[in-house]
Image (spheres, rainbow, N blue to C red):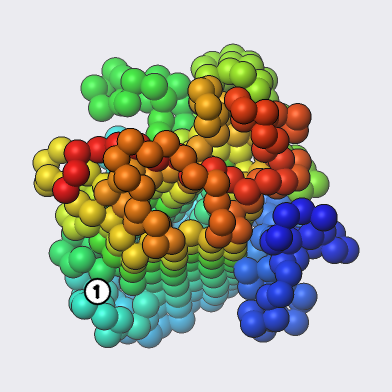
Amino acid sequence: MPVGMYSLQGGIWRGHNRSDVPASSLNDGFVDDVTMPVWLGTNNPSNNVGCLYNVPRTTVATLPGTQAPGKIWQDLTITGQVTITQPGQTFINCRGTYSYTGNTGGGMFFLNSQTLSGGSGQTVAPTVFKFCEMEPATPNDRYNGVYGHDFYFYRSVITRTVDAFGLYNPGNPYLNTEIACSWLGNLSWFNDDRQAVGDGHGDGTHNDTFQNGACRRNKVHGCFCQGAKFNTLNPGNITLDPLTGRDFTYATGNGVTPLDASANNRWPQQGQCYLGKADAYYPVNDIEFHHNWLWNFDNGFKLISSSTGLGTFLIDNVSVHDNVFGGVWRNWGGAHRFYPIRYDNNCTVNGYKPAPGAVFITDTWNNVWDPGANPGVTYSDGSPIAGQPVRHRFDTVTAA
């Protein structure tokens, strides 16, 4: 039996003592924050998230420029970029396939209008996505799936974009976003990251499932996040397990090198699952990240409190609990080796603020390694990884 949180029952990962969460309105046995999201490609009968199996959709280029507030869009395949201009739009069983060919950022679904903003509270209706999929016809290393604020994303899928979500609200300190019970991952990258045009990172495309570059009030729960990256120049490098979508196999070449328990190697794996970085417009605060499954990452949940440009920000009111970390993770070496949860001494997580110079603590908030994670691997002190509480890794920054 795994530590504390969940067990395998009839092929579905179910949590313990979770009778407080609602069952699906589809009466399909899916229970929010309890059932592991599964997505094995569009229109697969084994999916429990994403577009509804064998429900026909009509193909359209995009939405009209003028949208009535509260409009419902249902059973569509949308081939162009979708820009949301009015609050309260609802998308049900819609699949976005927009393929961006430029060299700047943005999103397949773009929600950056200030008419959508909830101000200091949720005073406008959010955009809602239910049973939707966002997968560009041509995988892209520059565009996100959803970019913006004031939305609710439920039992849906984003794959083969650079980041799944760009969480930003340049004109307002509040995101007012909730992402729940969705399958997210296999994001797009390539090794040289467009060095020829002078805007690359130099170490390959950086992928984050959730990039919260500014603003507060974001909830993420019940999601499965797949950290294995999709190589746009050599799609055969990474292949997901066709039966579960959790594990992956890889082939060397084109920037992908062998992965083992001792290698300092990031190429097959996404950088961060959740990156909160207070360096854009406002401090990053008010985050709830719980009952998620994180598979095959460099870092899991990572906060960076200070950066150049805007000085030093504190990050507080962050709750990270009851998450499962599985698959094969990058081994960073040293005493910690793995970074499932990482933040610095200007951050307060679960009410705990590390002192400058602190190195790690063992989790007491039910964040655990899956029993099959990094099999046979231990920390440098000999403690096993698989099936055990994770360790929080700390960095020291200049005190605020």
**Left or right: 314 with respect to 68?**
left
Name the spot of residue 283 as percent of width and height, x first: 22, 57
**Left or right: 339 with respect to 376?**
left
> Pointer 1: residues within 10 angstroms few (<14), some, or many (20+)?
many
Q: Is mark 1 on a helix, strand or loop?
A: loop
Decide if residue 238 is in sight here: no
Decide if residue 37 is in sight here: yes
Can you say whether 274 is above or below 223 in the image?
A: above
- Compare residues 361 and 7 and report the one nearer the observer: 361
Report the quarter where the N terminus lies. bottom right
Residue ID at (42%, 36%): 359
Residue ID at (88%, 63%): 10
**Left or right: 101 with respect to 283?**
right
Can you say whether 318 is above or below 325 in the image?
A: below
- Compare residues 242 and 68 and report the one nearer the observer: 242
Three-letter amino acid code of the residue under disc 1: Ser
- Compare residues 18 and 198 and report the one nearer the observer: 18
Q: How many labels does the image show?
A: 1
Residue ID at (70%, 57%): 38
Name the spot of residue 190 as percent of width and height, x first: 46, 26
Residue where numbered disc 1 is placed: 117
Residue ID at (46%, 40%): 360
